[in-house]
Image: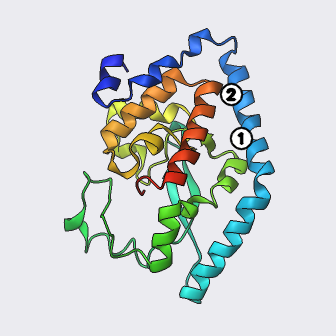
């Protein structure tokens, strides 16, 4: 990933993070990153568990008897498939309805996105706007399937990747990443992969911390939707 590639997307500022200047080896970096994940998730547990309980109650009250959580198989490090947890924000048969609404898909398949998706419930729209639908994913972080910062895991398998896409599979997927803070849903998959590769090439503790703080800022300003 060159500075020219990044500037085309107006993300050239990433080049200020230079892991070569770090005294940390890759092994030490990964250890500190894991400890940071566990510490931040554990310390914030009273907050996110409370919001999880309130969100689950709201979903249940809207549709008693329907599933509250949505467990979807995603693609993680080295192409390994794992079960990622989210709140259900769509009608229970949303996956089956994809074919019905395929003509509205705004991205290149297997990516799938519809602005004002008719499958999204009323409570689901609120959860998505506030990103509260992602709150069950700290459990994935505790399990070691994910990290706080990294490429977002795709619902489609690595078999659907082009060869150059597979570089994003060299690291654990994250709860947030570069495309979350600069593009979110507006960024097409190829550009998201370019951002993922830029992150992987430059990843260091300072970049991880920067992305976490920028994510909080984006959420507070309610920029975009996912």
Of callouts 1 and 2, which one flags the residue occurring earlier in the amino acid sequence? Answer: 2
Task: Let me know if residue 146 appears in the view.
Answer: yes
Task: Give the mark toward the camera: 1 or 2.
Answer: 1
Q: Residue at x 47, y 56 (%)?
A: 222
Q: Check if mark 1's residue and mark 2's residue have beta carbons within 8 Å.
A: no
Residue that numbered label 1 is attached to:
37
Q: SS for tag 1?
A: helix
Residue 195 picture location, percent across and down = 41, 33
For residue 11, what is the image quadrant? top left
Q: Residue at x 45, y 71 (%)?
A: 125
Query: Looking at the image, which residue is at 79% across and 50% down?
Result: 42
Number of marks present in the image shown:
2
Q: Can I make out residue 89 in this image?
A: no
Measured from the top left, where is residue 127 in percent x and y? Answer: 52, 68
Q: Is residue 65 above or below residue 200?
A: below
Note whether 176 is above or below 59 in the view shown: above
For the C terminus, the quadrant is bottom left
| Residue 144 placement: quadrant | top right
């Amino acid at each position: 990933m060159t500075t020219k590639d990044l500037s085309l997307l107006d993300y050239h500022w990433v080049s200020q993070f230079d892991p070569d200047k770090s005294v940390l080896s890759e092994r030490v970096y990964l250890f500190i990153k894991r400890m940071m994940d566990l510490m931040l998730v554990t310390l914030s547990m009273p907050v996110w568990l409370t919001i999880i309980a309130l969100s689950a109650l709201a979903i249940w009250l809207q549709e008693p008897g329907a599933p509250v959580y949505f467990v979807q198989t995603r693609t993680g490090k080295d192409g390994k498939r794992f079960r990622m947890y989210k709140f259900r924000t769509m009608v229970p048969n949303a996956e089956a309805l994809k074919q019905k609404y395929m003509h509205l898909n705004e991205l290149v398949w297997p990516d799938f996105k519809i602005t004002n998706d008719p499958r999204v419930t009323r409570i689901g729209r609120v959860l998505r706007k506030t990103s509260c639908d992602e709150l069950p994913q700290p459990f994935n972080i505790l399990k070691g399937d994910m990290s706080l910062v990294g490429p977002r895991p795709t619902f489609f398998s690595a078999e659907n990747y082009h060869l150059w896409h597979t570089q994003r599979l060299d690291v654990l997927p994250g709860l947030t990443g570069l495309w979350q803070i600069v593009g979110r849903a507006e960024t097409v998959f190829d550009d998201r992969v370019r951002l993922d590769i830029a992150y992987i090439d430059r990843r260091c503790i300072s970049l991880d911390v920067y992305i976490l703080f920028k994510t909080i800022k984006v959420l507070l300003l309610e920029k975009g939707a996912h």
